Amino acid sequence: MLDTLQSELETYERRTPASRAAHAKAAARLPLGVASNYRSYQPYPLHVRDGNGARIRDIDGNEYIDFNMCFGALMAGHCHPAVMHAVAATLQTGTMFGMPHDAENALAEEICARFPVDMVRFSNSGTESTMHAMRLARAATGRERIIKMEGGYHGLHDAVLVSVKPKAGEVGDPARPTAVPGGEGITKATLSNTLIAQFNDLAAIERLFAAYPGEIAAVIVEPILMNVGILMPDAGYHQGLREITRKHGALLIFDEVKTGAKLARGGACEYFGIEPDIICLAKSIGGGFSLAAFAARRAIMNLITDHRVFHGGTYNTNPVAMAAGLATLREVLTPAAYERVTRLNTKLVDGYRDIIKKSELEAYVLGAGANGALMFAPKPIRNYRDWLDIDSESWRHYWFAMTNRGVIPQPYWWDEQWTVSVAHTDADIDRHLELFAEIAPAVAAGQRDRRVRAAAPTEPPKATTQHDRSAPAAR
Ligand SMILES: Cc1ncc(COP(=O)(O)O)c(C=O)c1O
């Protein structure tokens, strides 16, 4: 019998009654029953009991090979022994001092050895690091406006929670996209300083610099847009951004929160051969702990040295996170680890490509470093507006079918991507591919069926609100 999306949802509910009960309980005390909107999905999210290496177990006792890896923050895998050992030792000698200690400089050295930067400041989340990077850019240029890409995500502070997931009816003229707040509470004054361009549109960046001469402090960009699956830059796009920003005396900020540790040892800077002015790091540099950083050449970071830009934070460089970061960069994310993970990811991506072809799925697969994504679109997307047409029903079918069989193929939501960690093995990749081959024909059949029904004149309009991903508030 054909496993439809509906039957997969029923199986999910049958397998995970404890998650359902836990979610119902949590919803009384936590909005949406979760601690971050991104974790919320229908019918309810899996509740986790524990994780180790490449595996997690939910509270019903189901085991999964995990390719979510905490939204890509765990290239080290769960509980990597080197990280756990370093953290355990630190737990005996003090968890917070709010005073300098040796690990700070040691970790700054590691980052400067990987990226084209001279100085580093640490923080605790990607949100913080992009917020400080943007303030530095404003101070360095004496300008207030920032350009960000439609569909790009840089965390939760007001200036960037703009045009992250605007609805199709809100986006405006493709040449001059509307700045759409990602929820209520963002001031009009903040909005007016955030200018939006489509990714892969260099002419739009030029137009904005022409429209606001001497007013734009920086362009902030995810080097690969990884909050719409995987969206690669056109050849020469980053070189173009580099040239245009230099020409206009503005800074280029690479938000490497996702790419920094996972794309290559030196992140997107190395991968694309670009030297941005400021980089933002978080997620996988911490090996499973809250650790983030922003870093730049000395002249820019001296704005902090010279007391022109203020940066602080109680939890900054807490010894636990620093020990985790040091172990991760020194012992886990080694050149050999990048080689191995890239090989495993290539095997996974190539396997997907074969299966997509054989099963006649209308989809394509992309891989970059440790990441990959199955994109349910007939041809490669080039910007956020293309992504809006992703076949989310087929994606949901895919995700629940894989998860029900023991492989979480990526975080829930079709704007995410999988992470291959150092803990994954060839056998894990083989199992992932074996399951994908098993479910792909049913997903393809469901996709064909929906297309036929959509083409029929009597088909009622598709009810998508419940699973609408077009606004962060709906996640
Ligand atoms: C590219 C990018 N920048 C910034 C952030 C925000 O990081 P955090 O969730 O640690 O605040 C994220 C989070 O997913 C991200 O993907």
Image: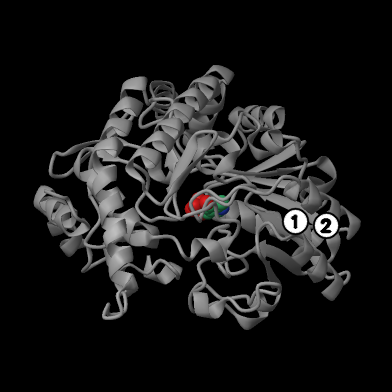
Identity of the amino acid at label 1? Leu
Q: Pick the quarter of the image with the C terminus.
A: bottom left
Q: Nearer the viewer, residue 365 or 94?
A: 365
In the displayed structure image, the side of residue 204 where residue 225 appears, left or right: left
Measured as percent of width and height from the top left, residue 152 is found at 58, 59
Task: Give the total number of marks visible in the rendering.
Answer: 2
Density class for disc 2 (Cα within 10 Å; few <14, some 14-19, many ≥20) is: many
Left or right: 239 as drawn, with respect to 427: right
Q: Residue at x 48, y 75 (%)?
A: 183
Front residue of 161/424: it is 424
Rendered residue at 65%/72% (across/down):
174
Task: Say whether residue 175 is left or right of residue 321.
Answer: right
Q: Is residue 25 visible?
A: yes
Residue 140 has which mark?
A: 2
Q: CA distance from mark 2 to mark 1?
A: 6 Å
Q: Position of residue 347 (x, y in %)?
A: 44, 27
Graded by Cα atoms within 10 Å as few (under 14), some (14 to 19) or many (20 or more), the crowding at tag 1 reads many
Residue 345 % position (x, y): 46, 30
Q: Is mark 1 within 8 Å of ligand 1?
A: no
Q: Secondary structure at mark 2?
A: helix
Q: Is residue 115 above or below residue 178?
A: above
What's the mark number on residue 369? none
Instruction: Tell me: residue 74, above or below residue 454.
Output: above
- Identify the residue at image location x=45%, y=37%: 95
CB atoms at circles 2 and 1 under 8 Å apart? yes
Q: Disc 1 marks which residue?
A: 136
220 on left or right of 447: right
| SS label for mark 1 | helix
Q: In the picture, residue 70 is in which quadrant?
A: top left
User: What amino acid does circle 2 point to?
Assistant: Ala
